[in-house]
């Protein structure tokens, strides 16, 4: 039988462990290099309610058919919680390599979760020497009494290849499409050229089955190896992927010094990094802008000054009917919640709501409310509901 709700609420394991945010050093260094300039802000048509506090939260998802949500902490904990009640650690999570931008990352549930109870995690693992790479794995969520929630049979099903040195640009966001396939964003690990190399799966959006196999209709499937995994290439640090109601895949990624992007992800296309970008390298080297190379896909929206995007959600609820179909992005250096208006295959900037903190994640609840996670130690989970 399922874990009784009363037993869950009596749990005393806290979700607000204190600590230093040294694990965010890599992102903080990148943000510090970005020009701090005034940004347009708008009124807030929502009320913000603090729900819980976590230690360096990175991602969250709601558990279908239950009142619970799962939250990852970058240091390696997966937590199961309901509202403001104390959270319970989920056992069976793999060991993660933390440092810089690396650690425990995304969490999503299988489209048929009610039948198979499968949960997917992304995380960073250590390799030979000082190398690291992102991994996606899955396990079955078990909440049977009397034990604590746990992932049974957790096993990796995808890895970044090759593992390289450094602590940045892992990407490792996960989304399931209406085709039942699993899409994974993979950063170029601050190595630039892998984004254009089909012999590596860095700097790409990958498409796999729910077990990690390669679909036969992938654009480069005939090439075999990691090339067969590739859906699109030429990406830098994609930190959010989401499908709209019409089944189109959208992606946001951090540009270099300038040029954060929102892209419509189209099978087999090349998005140009590091050959083109609407920003430049941090050392001052100029990168040609997208219009100079029309063979590459240009972003639908870009920012300079930047927002340092993190998390991506496309709203489909009824609580904010005026925003149905809009994309929402967390802004790290912008310390804002960003709304982008989507219209078919086009996108335009809409609102930028100041939040007073770095926003790491954006999700939609089953009640239609918008939930955001603040970044860093003592990062709060905030629930946004319409203002009266």
Image: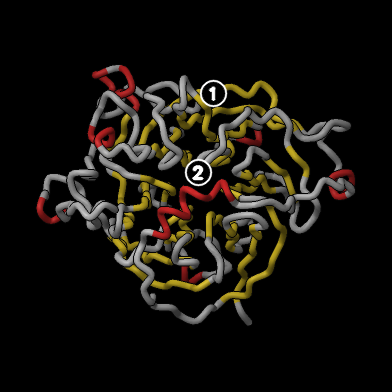
Dot 2 alpha-carbon crowd within 10 angstroms: few under 14, some 14 to 19, many 20 or more: some
Tag 2, which secondary structure?
Answer: loop
Dot 1 alpha-carbon crowd within 10 angstroms: few under 14, some 14 to 19, many 20 or more: some
| Badge nearest the viewer, 2 or 1 | 2
Q: Position of residue 331 (x, y in %)?
A: 46, 62
Residue under the image location 38 percent in, 65 percent down: 340
Which sits in the foreground, 115 or 253?
Answer: 253
User: Which residue bears the numbered disc 2?
Assistant: 100
Residue under the image location 53 percent in, 50 percent down: 24
Task: Specify the quadrant that holds the C terminus.
Answer: bottom right
State whether residue 211 is above or below residue 321.
Answer: above
Which sits in the foreground, 314 or 25?
Answer: 25
What is the CA distance from the residue labelled 2 to the residue labelled 1? Answer: 22 Å
Specify whether residue 190 is in view. Answer: yes
Q: Compare marks 2 and 1 and give the one earlier in the sequence.
A: 2
Q: Position of residue 237 (x, y in %)?
A: 37, 45
Q: Which mark is residue 156?
A: 1
Q: Position of residue 41 (x, y in %)?
A: 43, 78
Specify whether residue 178 is in view. Answer: no
- Whether residue 68 sits left or right of residue 306 in the image: it is right
């Amino acid at each position: 039988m399922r874990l009784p709700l009363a037993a869950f609420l009596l749990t005393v394991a806290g979700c607000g462990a204190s600590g230093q945010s040294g694990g965010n050093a890599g992102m903080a260094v990148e943000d510090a290099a970005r020009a701090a300039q005034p940004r347009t802000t708008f009124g807030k048509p929502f009320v913000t309610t603090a729900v819980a506090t976590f230690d360096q939260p990175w991602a969250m998802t709601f558990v279908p058919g239950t009142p619970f949500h799962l939250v990852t902490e970058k240091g390696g904990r997966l937590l199961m919680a309901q509202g403001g009640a104390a959270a319970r650690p989920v056992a069976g999570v793999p060991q993660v390599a933390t440092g810089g931008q690396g650690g425990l990352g995304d969490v999503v549930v299988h489209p048929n979760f009610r039948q198979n109870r499968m949960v997917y995690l992304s995380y960073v693992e250590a390799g030979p020497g000082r190398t690291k790479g992102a991994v996606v794995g899955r396990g079955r969520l078990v909440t049977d009494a009397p034990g604590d929630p746990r992932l049974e049979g957790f096993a990796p099903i995808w890895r970044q290849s090759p593992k390289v040195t450094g602590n940045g640009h892992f990407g490792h966001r996960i989304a399931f499409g209406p085709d039942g396939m699993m899409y994974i964003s993979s950063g170029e690990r601050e190595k630039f050229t892998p984004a254009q190399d089909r012999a590596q799966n860095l700097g790409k959006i990958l498409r796999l089955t729910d077990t990690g196999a390669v679909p036969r209709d992938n654009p480069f499937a005939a090439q075999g190896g990691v090339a067969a995994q590739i859906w699109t290439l030429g990406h830098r640090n994609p930190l959010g992927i989401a499908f709209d109601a019409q089944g189109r895949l959208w992606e946001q990624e951090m540009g270099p010094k300038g040029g954060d992007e929102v892209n419509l992800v189209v099978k087999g296309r090349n998005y140009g990094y590091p050959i083109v970008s609407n920003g430049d390298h941090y050392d001052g080297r100029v990168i040609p802008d997208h219009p100079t190379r029309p063979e590459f896909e240009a972003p639908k929206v870009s920012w300079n000054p930047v927002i340092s995007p993190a998390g991506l959600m496309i709203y489909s609820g009824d609580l904010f009917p005026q925003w149905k179909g809009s994309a929402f992005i967390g802004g790290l250096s912008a310390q804002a919640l960003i709304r982008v208006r989507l219209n078919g295959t086009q996108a335009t900037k809409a609102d930028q709501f100041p939040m007073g903190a770095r926003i790491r994640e954006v999700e939609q609840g089953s009640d239609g409310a918008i939930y955001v996670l603040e970044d860093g130690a003592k990062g709060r989970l905030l629930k946004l509901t319409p203002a009266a």
